[in-house]
Amino acid sequence: MKVSLITLTCSFLLATGAAAFQFPGGTHPQSKVTLPASKSLADGPSRRSFLQSAGVMVATSFLNPTKSNAVQVGGKIQYGDESIMSPKAHGTSAKPVQDDLLYGVSNKLADKITNFNRHFAEMGGYFRSTNFEDVVLQSKGPVTFYDSVTGKPLFVAPIGRSADEFLRESEIHGWPSFRDEEVVWENVRVLKGSGETVSVDGTHLGHNLPDRKGNRYCINLVSVAGKPV
């Protein structure tokens, strides 16, 4: 029986990856609310390196847009109202996050941030403990980021800038930072007044924090770590 390398890698990550990438405790600089620390296992450098490399291989295998899954990206900001975030079967969403999220993010943290939260965020710099940066740098083009709940495309980046520029801006602010031209507006809305950035299905993504360059969408990696469906 033939088993693909991706299938084997996914199985290995699901079995061991949860202990490899844990959410460190800390205070979110915007909310000033202390988030609880998670226990983690001490991994040797070789094991951690292998897990991250394997994760990059799996992620880049299907995150690059192709002609068959191309989406309309960019355009004018699209606003929404509070009804988008009304209570549903699972918090503000109809269901929990996917079981096998990308980048080695914590599923428990992802479900809390995306479905049961409107104001708080993952710890600043959290994405640096994942293979997010490696995926972006090793990609042969822009990377598509999918809703952790629905699997719908939400952002495609970098567009109009290099991978290094995209990562540099994200590192400066502490969260993956997207611009108007990198948003899939069919599936993303910004709530007037608060700037909360959400999916049309009720997934909390982050906030719009404009700067001198224009709109900047400060997004939780755990919210955009889904796989396409």
Image (cartoon, grey):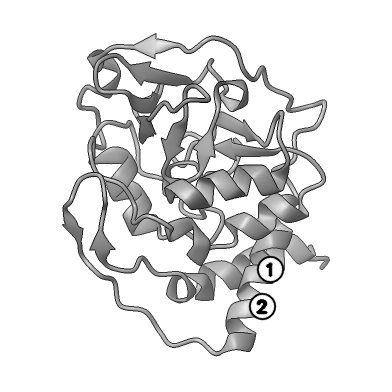
Q: Furthest residue to the front?
A: 212
Q: Is 207 situated above or below 148?
A: above
Q: Residue at x 22, y 38 (%)?
A: 119
Q: Which mark is residue 54?
A: 1
**Residue 124 versus residue 223: which sits nearer the camera?**
124
**Would you say residue 20 is visible in this rendering?**
yes
Residue 56 in the image, given as x and y percentages of width and height: 68, 61
**Residue 12 versus residue 31: which sits nearer the camera?**
31
Tell me whether circle 1 and circle 2 mark residues in contact (CB < 8 Å): yes
**Residue located beneath label 2 in the image:** 50
CA–CA distance in space, label 1 to label 2: 6 Å
Image side of residue 122 versus residue 221, left or right: left
For the C terminus, give its image quadrant: top right
Residue type (three-letter) at the residue carrying disc 2: Phe
Residue type (three-letter) at the residue carrying disc 1: Ala
Q: Quadrant of residue 107?
A: bottom left
Q: Secondary structure at mark 2?
A: helix
Query: Quick one: label 2, few (<14), some, or many (20+) residues within 10 Å?
Result: few
Q: Residue at x 29, y 14 (%)?
A: 192
Q: Residue at x 45, y 11 (%)?
A: 78
Image side of residue 179 versus residue 165, left or right: left
